Image: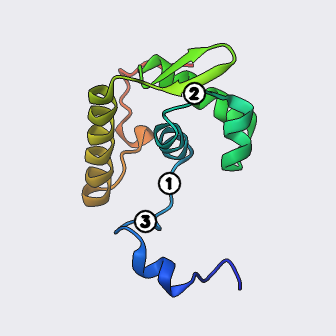
Amino acid sequence: MSSGAIDIDEFENADPGGFEERTDTERIVLFLDEHDDRAWKAATIAERLGLEMDAVSAILSRLKERGLVRHKRPYWAITDDKERLHSAYRLHRHHERADEQYGAERLEELRTDEMEDVQ
């Protein structure tokens, strides 16, 4: 069977929105949250999710800055602050809904002469 089709039982038993494409960041957070009883090496996360190692490392670093993951070299785990994680998810969903309703913002369209280039 091609990847363009799934078993009808899988379809019927799926959660609403279960087939939507997820970003790499969402996939990493979901993976770590679903396996919150373990800490993982970035290379293992990349392998399990089929992502590039450099991308996973960069995403994990950004998530650490936001307090959403914990890190003790060489392992990574989801935060134990579930309220922070839920708040971040709610904010993320809010932004997604706003993008769907109003369209995604494009910085270049918002640029003014007074704005400074950040590199």
Q: Name the quarter where the N terminus is drawn.
A: bottom right
Against 18, residue 1 (above or below) is: below
Residue occupying image coordinates x 27% and y 38%: 91
Colour pattern of the rendering: rainbow
Question: Which class describes the residues within 10 Å of circle 1: few (<14), some (14-19), or many (20+)?
Answer: few
Circle 2 residues within 10 Å: few <14, some 14–19, many ≥20: many
What residue type is disc 2 on?
Answer: Leu
> Would you name the residue on which mark 3 appears?
18
Vertical position of residue 52 compared to residue 17: above or below: above
Q: Residue visible at 33% across and 40% down?
A: 89
> Residue 109 vs residue 28: left or right?
left
Residue 37 lies, in percent from the top left, at 51, 32
Q: Which residue is mark 1?
A: 22
State whether residue 66 is above or below residue 8.
above
Res 101 → quadrant: bottom left
> How many angstroms separate mark 1 from mark 2 (CA)?
16 Å
- Mark 1 and mark 2 in contact? Answer it, CB < 8 Å: no
Identified by mark 1, the residue type is Arg
Left/right of residue 119 with respect to residue 45 in the rendered view: left
Dot 2: what SS?
helix
| Residue under numbered circle 2 | 60
On the image, the x and y values in percent for residue 86 come to 29, 36
- Closer to the eye: label 1 or 3: 3
The amino acid type found where label 3 is placed reads Gly
Which of the 4 quarters of the picture holds residue 38?
top right
Where residue 103 sits in the image (x, y, percent)?
A: 32, 56
In the rendered picture of this protein, how many numbered marks are placed on residues? 3
